[in-house]
Image (cartoon, rainbow, N blue to C red):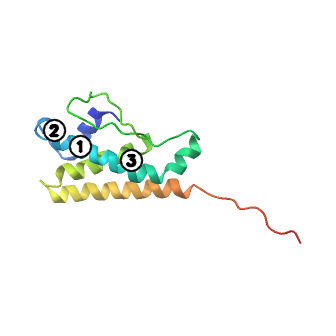
Amino acid sequence: MTWLELKNIIKTLGFEENSILTEYQEIIINACNLSVSTINDIVVSRLQGYFKSQDKDWVKPEITPFTAETPDDFELEMPKLVHKLVPYLAAYHVWLDDDERKAIYYYNMYQDMKDELVGEYTRAMKATIVGGYDI
């Protein structure tokens, strides 16, 4: 997901006009930085076992914060698996002051998607125990 795609999804989730991207620019940037950081620290950390099972050299990404100068084609620096969570958590932060009902709805969407994702990919991890006594 690119920076432009993320901004447009947040705008669409808020049922807003294009002017919102300029009017709320600082709020959107801060909300996206907080959301990406939170998801990287909580969700990506909980899924490390899965990512390492797919690529033994995988390391948790270092996140570059968004700024007003971030180019629109800048890609999110986290696993694609968790990209879909970012707009909902960011929308929660953006709309919390203006429309609490809308914000809570987006937080619930984020929470449901996060729980499903973490549950699905941590449930897939299995261990086989071998050994014992031969009688």
Place of residue 10 in the rendered image (x, y in percent of width and height, measured from the top left): 23, 43
Contact between labelled residues 2 and 1, with CB atoms less than 8 Å apart? no
Mark 1 = which residue? 10
Q: Name the residue under label 3.
A: 40
Identify the residue at image location x=33%, y=51%.
38
User: Residue type at mark 2?
Assistant: Gln
Relative depth, front residue between 116 and 32: 32
Q: How crowded is mark 1: few (under 14 residues within 10 Å), some or many (20 or more)?
A: many
Task: Identify the residue under disc 2.
Answer: 25
Q: How far apart are marks 2 and 3 (CA)?
A: 22 Å
Which residue type carries mark 3? Asn
Query: In the picture, which quadrant includes the C terminus?
Result: bottom right
Residue 87: quarter of image: top left
Which circle, 1 or 3, is nearer the viewer? Answer: 3
Cα distance in 3D space between marks 1 and 3 = 19 Å
Nearer to the camera, 78 or 13? 78
Mark 1 and mark 2 lie on one chain; the one further toward the N terminus is 1
